[in-house]
Image (cartoon, helix red, strand yellow):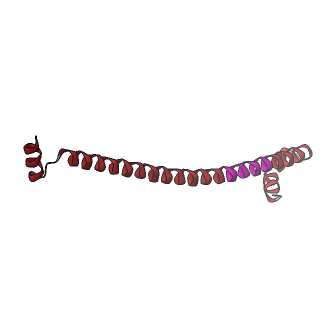
Amino acid sequence: MIKEETIRRQNGLDVHELFYSIDFVLMKLDQLENKVGRKTEERIESRYHSYRLDLCLTGCDLEQIDQRLERLKKRFSSNRSESSMSETKSSLVPLKKKAWSAL
């Protein structure tokens, strides 16, 4: 048995050292894989929050536009109904100019 171990050491094939080296490389590989995974998750999360913020701001802008349109519709319909009661059909063309110029 001593003779076989001596031969392995001379050829650089110590089994224990080989297994230790393999385990060490696998451990380093796992550490690298975990590090890459964490960095990837951080980048995805950062971009997600950035896009979510942009979408929220756009949603707020759309809501404001929608509210303004509703107010304009109400004004236009109230102006139209008031003037239609007092005016005849022949004066409807100036009514449109009057309603939009009031805005």
Name the spot of residue 81 as percent of width and height, x first.
87, 44
Given residues 65 and 35, the one toward you in this image is 35
Residue 36 lies in magenta, yes or no?
no
- Start and end of the magenta stretch? 59-73
Given residues 93 and 67, the one toward you in this image is 67
Name the spot of residue 66 as percent of width and height, x first.
72, 48
Quarter of the C terminus within the rendering: bottom right
Left or right of residue 68: residue 55: left
Q: Residue at x 33, y 49 (%)?
A: 29
Name the spot of residue 75 as percent of width and height, x first.
83, 49
**Of all residues shown, which one is farthest toward the bottom?**
101
Q: Residue at x 78, y 56 (%)?
A: 100
Q: Residue at x 7, y 48 (%)?
A: 7
Left or right of residue 82: residue 33: left
Name the spot of residue 82 as percent of width and height, x first.
90, 46
Predominant secondary structure, magenta span = helix
Quarter of the N terminus within the rendering: top left
Given residues 62 and 89, the one toward you in this image is 62
Left or right of residue 35: residue 28: left
> How many labels, in total?
0
Given residues 64 and 54, the one toward you in this image is 54
**Of all residues shown, which one is farthest toward the right?**
86
**Of all residues shown, which one is farthest toward the top?**
1
Residue 61 lies in magenta, yes or no?
yes
